Image (cartoon, rainbow, N blue to C red):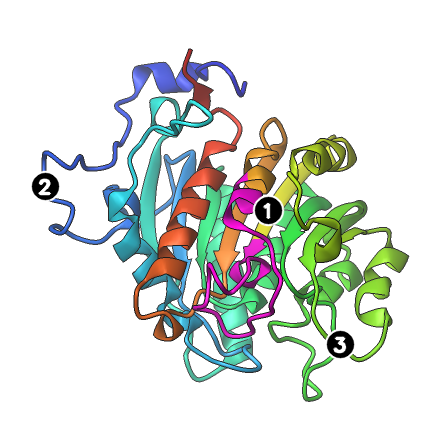
Amino acid sequence: MSDQLSSKSTSRVLNQPLGGNDMPRFGGIATMMRLPHVTSSVGLDACFVGVPFDLGTSNRSGARFGPRQIRTESVLLRPYNMATRAAPFDALQVADIGDVAINPYNLLDSIRIIEEAYDGIAASGCRPVTLGGDHTIVLPILRALHKKYGKIGLIHVDAHADVNDTMFGEKIAHGTPFRRAVEEGLLDCNRVVQIGQRGTGYTAEDFDWCRDQGFKVVQVEECWNKSLAPLMEEVRARVAGGPVYLSFDIDGIDPAYAPGTGTPEIAGLTVPQALEIIRGAWGLDVIGADVVEIAPPYDPHGTTALLGANLAYEMLCVFPGVLRRD
């Protein structure tokens, strides 16, 4: 399916990003990639959706502004991937379905709202690329996708493992989602890979808990000064055979490239390595993806959001059904 048109796409008029000769790139409405904005995922193969939520942050807030800034910076993106030859808009019906209307005064109610929104996306058969928002949002997303797909494999790029038991006594925050996901049976733990973890901590258990669950943990030191293409061959072999979710915390990348985030850690992944990770997911049954923790107030030049927009596009390019032109 990944290298040929699906039968339903041949009879449809597919949405296309607005071209730079149709409207100057500094003009028009700032949807993701200047795609049409629609209010429902019904009839779509994939969608971009924003979750402007940062009630779960522990250091610097501001990720609530991520979806809007990512869309603004996405105006430079064009429909064809020159490196991989992926042409997602040749085969998939894609649109921007706007933002989930979270409750800015209530974290737990927001989690409920997000889960219900993704219930609808999953029920429609649409595969979401989520623009975050802090990493708390992956828990309700996984809950919703699990109802449709069952246990999910995971490729998780992040400076942090996000498996704290509690934060200030709370079970749900941006540092706890993957422990909750394990406890709730959402993940196929032997098909989970975490890449880029680093920094200071409290005990070895901060990362070793993940290994004890069956995760493959690739700390950042294993990634320095090398291509990650060989690693991704191993990752594909490990997570293949079922649905896979790709979750990308922007702080997985070194703050020299992505300063606009709430919990920056030095000595992170490079941008080319980030592309190798995402492109390395080609051929997997990717059921959804996110790029989270982009906090525009800490990057006045917009570079972090520009990077996030490109990563979101690259995620779309590895979805099942995407054509690669000859």
Q: Is residue 18 left or right of residue 280?
A: left
Marks 2 and 1 sit apart, C-alpha to C-alpha, by 32 Å
For label 2, the residue is: 23
Residue marked by disc 1? 246
Residue annotated with mark 3: 201
Q: Residue furthest top?
A: 326
Q: Is residue 75 above or below residue 179?
A: above
Which type of secondary structure does the marked residue at label 3 adopt? loop
Binning the other alpha carbons within 10 Å of mark 2 as few (below 14), some (14 to 19) or many (20 upward) gives: few
- Quick one: label 2 or label 1, which is nearer the N terminus? 2
Q: Bounds of the magenta span?
A: 248-275
Residue 211 x/y as whole percent: 86, 56
Asked whether residue 126 appears in the rendered view, the answer is: no
Alpha carbon of mark 3 to alpha carbon of mark 1: how far? 24 Å
Q: Residue at x 50, y 79 (%)?
A: 55
| Secondary structure type for disc 1 | strand
Image quadrant occupied by the C terminus: top left
Residue 85 position within the rendered picture, expressed as x and y whole percent measured from the top left: 42, 22
